[in-house]
């Protein structure tokens, strides 16, 4: 099935413009695009960027970081340099990660320049010349040919079978024929589109910022906002900062009233501030996001912006492009109709592998002569070719019109050989397709003499009595079937032929007295994984929305096949949006004929309604929406560089099912952040309660500042960070996402924190009072029990208790327990912390009491599991 331009028969280009000279070696549009795909936007000129110091200041404005900075400064002032160093290390790591992510995100707008062809062929002063694409100016006469990337917007002055793929800009799956009729879009071309067939002359009308690409670039100038987790943590940080200041002031005042020294109480207040603030939170979040990004990479999902990992878990609406995202991005002839019956063609892409099925059975050329005649004629009346893959990693490629290539693939699946047909019936004449006639006719010499006329075109153009010799009943049946196929989103072609004796009749006689062979329904079919992905999203409470630039009937058919919407649901068009007759944009499941601006409006409307929106796409027209959505997901293989750079997540395998796996990882991250907050804040609450209630139980200063900081360092250190690596819970994808407005401590987390904090404090205080009354070193016992009980809570917080799914947590807790015991028995640490060694019996008792933390936390998780979110989505659901 291989085919090349040079293999075409004489006469095939008779009605085309003279050949343009080839592009100079090394400067072809194809080579330029290859280099862009290889190197990406790194070769683009750098744009002005904000200075590093300003980026650092932005990162340091986070409320939690501000509290930690104050704590680090006060800790340094008191001479506790070790704890100050730990706090500063967390701040530095968090800031560096944030700055790096911000710099990488700025690549999105820069990539738009990569969509222009590096060189252009223009006519200046009557001579053809090659100039850099950046030097093309309005008024230039531009020459374009098959394979070229159009470098500027322009008006078509002359064209010969000029067909342009505009899917990256418009989402239209079918290439558009161009003609010099002066009407847009047929009479114009846009920068960044690709010529798939023919040649043309174009008068340049707009370049740079005034071009279509420039207009899209202006839509991508707004920086992405905070992720749901960042917004939640910012609110949490402000509340925690205020509460911490108040509590520390209370502890300081109580100590001074009891006659404690000012210096001691200031150090104690600082220690409690550090204890109350979960300073490991940035490290936990970063580790959880990094592990999520690594796991996503293992599943062929490349994370470009680390916070995007969690954002996926919060998504409530997934807005998706159609062409190349949910669909293959390659045309396929799926439905065949002849006066003798119907058949279905299976197979994807342009590979000849597939089947033709009639009445539930596979058929071949010999079994179905009517289907063979239909597809044989469609292959003869055809200017496309199929190119076999050059290596196993690539697929079959269409050369020319993708619709015609789909006809060749369908014929090959029935067992027909294009090369053998061309040898048997060589083409001698043709009438090319044009938009006025809406049909194409070719004439072939038969082996035994005479001519065969092959004709294909739109049903409304071909199913006419003056063209076809078939009776009215056959024409009526064919017209009815064509309407049914069109309503199901197919592009329908009618095919007819006739045999003549060799005559010198004028060409207009070729298109008369033809015999109808049948109809072919062609569509860009959904990917095999798309329906499963949409079903999984619905099961997880995520509402899918289809936004495409394609025809409304095509959009509706794809939405119905994938379960996004039912057939009776209305499709909102870009024209309705533009005329402001579409109503609320948040109550629709399918949008068609949308422009890049309208895609952006839809995404903003959904976000304005409180939804967390993921946008998936692959074209330049998807870039602004990808950039503005809460998270943008781009196709890695078929996607344009603009889409990849605008997105937060790139699917390296173009498999939409990967999105579901990524959502699961995002929910795991958020669950682990909440798991850490429960653990850390419960411990901080326990420490504050011990310091507040201890004096009322006869203990003037229950714990020394150094002891509080040591407990905080051990519990919030490795064990806390290890909680961020907990695996995903088994039922994660059976619940809807968390409501966007819900606090990070919502859904019953606050009561659980208070309960566990009170329990740990109660165990510590009871043990302290008992030890004090029996003459034991009560402060050391409280120090040991308070830290060890918190570590028991960490073990009871596991997502999958009793498994080895996260061995890092077991090792971290064991190491922390050893260090906690060392603080009581190691002489150097005893001097630093002011502790005394415990008797073996007291150590065993402390260990038993500490184990209660694990038991109670585990029972609480089982008896009072986290309340699953309710489905609060307001979008219509048609599936």
Image (cartoon, rainbow, N blue to C red):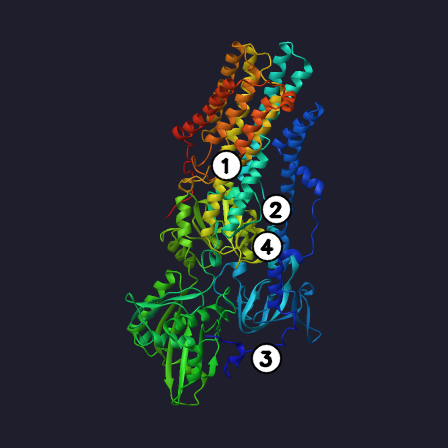
Q: Residues within 10 Å of mark 3 (few under 14, many from 20)?
A: few
Question: Which residue is disc 4 drawn over?
Answer: 216
The Cα atoms of the two marked residues, 1 and 3, are separated by 66 Å
Q: Which residue appears at 39% of the width and 30% of the height?
A: 862
> Percent x, y for residue 300?
51, 53
> Percent x, y for residue 105?
61, 48
Per the image, label 1 sits on a secondary structure element best described as helix
Q: Residues within 10 Å of mark 4 (few under 14, many from 20)?
A: many
The Cα atoms of the two marked residues, 1 and 4, are separated by 38 Å
Tell me whether circle 3 and circle 2 mark residues in contact (CB < 8 Å): no
**Which circle, 1 or 2, is nearer the viewer?**
1
Q: Residues within 10 Å of mark 2 (few under 14, many from 20)?
A: few
Q: Which residue appears at 65% of the width and 22% of the height?
A: 832
Question: Which residue is disc 1 drawn over?
Answer: 672
> Percent x, y for residue 460?
39, 70
Per the image, label 2 sits on a secondary structure element best described as loop
Nearer-N-terminus badge (1/2): 2
Tell me whether circle 1 and circle 4 mark residues in contact (CB < 8 Å): no
Nearer-N-terminus badge (2/4): 4
Residue 222's disc is: 2
Nearer-N-terminus badge (3/4): 3
The Cα atoms of the two marked residues, 3 and 2, are separated by 46 Å
Residue 789's disc is: none
Q: Which residue appears at 71% of the width and 24% of the height?
A: 77
The Cα atoms of the two marked residues, 1 and 2, are separated by 31 Å
């Amino acid at each position: 099935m291989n085919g090349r331009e040079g293999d075409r028969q004489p006469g095939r280009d008779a009605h085309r413009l003279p050949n343009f000279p080839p592009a100079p070696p090394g400067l072809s549009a194809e080579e330029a695009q290859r280099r862009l795909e290889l190197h990406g936007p790194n070769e683009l000129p750098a744009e002005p960027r904000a200075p590093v110091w300003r980026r650092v200041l932005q990162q340091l404005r986070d409320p939690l970081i501000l509290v930690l900075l104050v704590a680090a400064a006060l800790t340094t002032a008191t001479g506790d340099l070790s704890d100050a160093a730990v706090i500063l290390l967390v701040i530095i790591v968090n800031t560096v990660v944030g700055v790096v992510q911000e710099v990488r995100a700025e690549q999105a707008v820069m990539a738009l320049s990569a969509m222009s062809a590096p060189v252009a062929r223009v006519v200046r002063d009557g001579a053809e010349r090659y100039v850099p694409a950046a030097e093309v100016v309005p008024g230039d006469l531009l020459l374009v040919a098959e394979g070229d990337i159009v470098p500027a917007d322009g008006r078509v002055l002359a064209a010969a079978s000029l067909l342009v793929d505009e899917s990256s800009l418009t989402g239209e799956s079918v290439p558009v024929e161009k003609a010099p009729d002066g009407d847009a879009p047929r009479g114009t071309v846009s920068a960044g589109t690709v010529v798939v067939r023919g040649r043309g002359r174009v008068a340049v009308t707009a370049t740079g910022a005034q071009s279509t690409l420039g207009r899209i670039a202006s839509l991508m100038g707004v920086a992405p906002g905070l992720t749901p987790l960042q917004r939640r943590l910012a609110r949490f940080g402000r509340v925690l900062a205020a509460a911490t200041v108040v509590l520390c002031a209370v502890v300081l005042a109580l100590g001074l009233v009891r006659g404690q020294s000012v210096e001691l109480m200031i150090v104690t207040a600082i220690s409690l501030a550090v204890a109350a603030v979960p300073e490991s939170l940035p490290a936990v979040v970063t580790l959880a996001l990094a592990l999520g990004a690594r796991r996503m990479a293992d599943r062929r999902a490349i994370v470009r912006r680390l916070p995007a990992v969690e954002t996926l878990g919060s998504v409530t609406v997934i807005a998706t492009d159609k062409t190349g995202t949910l669909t293959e991005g390659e045309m396929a002839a799926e439905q065949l109709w002849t006066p003798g019956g119907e058949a279905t063609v299976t197979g994807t892409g342009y590979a000849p592998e597939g089947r033709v099925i009639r009445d539930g059975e596979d058929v071949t050329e010999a079994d179905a002569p009517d289907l063979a005649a239909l597809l044989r004629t469609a292959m003869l009346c055809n200017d496309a070719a199929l190119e076999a893959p050059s290596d196993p990693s690539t697929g079959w490629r269409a050369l020319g019109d993708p619709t015609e290539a789909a006809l060749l693939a369908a014929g090959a699946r029935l067992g027909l050989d294009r090369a053998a047909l061309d040898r048997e019936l060589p083409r001698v004449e043709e009438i090319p397709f044009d938009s006025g006639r809406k049909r194409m006719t070719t004439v072939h010499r038969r082996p035994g003499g005479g001519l065969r006329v092959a004709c294909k075109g739109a049903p409304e153009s071909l199913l006419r009595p003056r063209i076809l010799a078939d009776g009215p009943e056959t024409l009526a049946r064919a017209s009815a079937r064509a309407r049914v196929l069109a309503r199901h989103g197919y592009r329908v072609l009618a095919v007819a032929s006739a045999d003549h004796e060799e005559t010198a009749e004028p060409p207009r006689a070729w298109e008369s007295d033809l015999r109808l062979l049948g109809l072919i329904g062609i569509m860009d079919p959904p990917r095999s994984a798309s329906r499963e992905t949409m079903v999984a999203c619905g099961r997880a409470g995520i509402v899918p929305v289809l936004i495409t630039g394609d025809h409304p009937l095509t959009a509706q058919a794809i939405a119905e096949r994938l379960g996004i919407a039912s057939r009776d649901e209305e499709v909102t068009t870009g024209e309705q949006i533009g005329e402001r007759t579409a109503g609320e944009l948040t109550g629709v499941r399918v949008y068609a004929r949308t422009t890049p601006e309208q895609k952006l409006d839809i995404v903003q409307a959904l976000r304005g309604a409180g939804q967390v929106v993921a946008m998936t796409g692959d074209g330049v027209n998807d870039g602004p929406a990808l950039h503005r959505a809460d998270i943008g997901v781009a196709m890695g293989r078929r996607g344009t560089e603009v889409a990849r750079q605008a997105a937060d997540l790139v699917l390296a395998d173009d498999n939409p099912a990967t999105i579901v796996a990524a959502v699961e990882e995002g929910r795991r991250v958020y669950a682990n952040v909440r798991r850490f907050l429960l653990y850390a804040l419960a411990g901080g609450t326990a420490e504050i309660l011990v310091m507040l209630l201890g004096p009322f139980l006869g203990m003037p200063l229950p714990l020394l500042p150094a002891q509080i900081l040591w407990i905080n360092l051990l519990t919030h250190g490795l064990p806390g960070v290890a909680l961020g690596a907990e695996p995903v819970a088994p039922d994660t994808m059976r619940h809807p996402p968390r409501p966007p407005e819900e606090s990070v401590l919502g859904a019953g987390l606050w009561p659980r924190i208070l309960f566990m904090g009170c329990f740990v404090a109660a165990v510590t205080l009871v043990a302290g009072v008992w030890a004090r009354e029996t003459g034991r070193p009560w402060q050391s016992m409280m120090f040991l029990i308070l830290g060890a009980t918190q570590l028991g809570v960490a073990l009871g917080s596991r997502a999958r208790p009793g498994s080895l799914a996260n061995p890092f947590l077991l090792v971290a807790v064991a190491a922390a327990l050893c260090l906690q015991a060392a603080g009581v028995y190691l002489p150097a640490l005893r001097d630093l912390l002011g502790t005394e060694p415990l008797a073996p019996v007291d150590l065993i008792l402390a260990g038993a009491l500490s184990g209660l933390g694990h038991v109670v936390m585990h029972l609480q998780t089982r008896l009072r599991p986290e309340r699953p979110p309710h489905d609060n989505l307001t979008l219509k659901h048609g599936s």
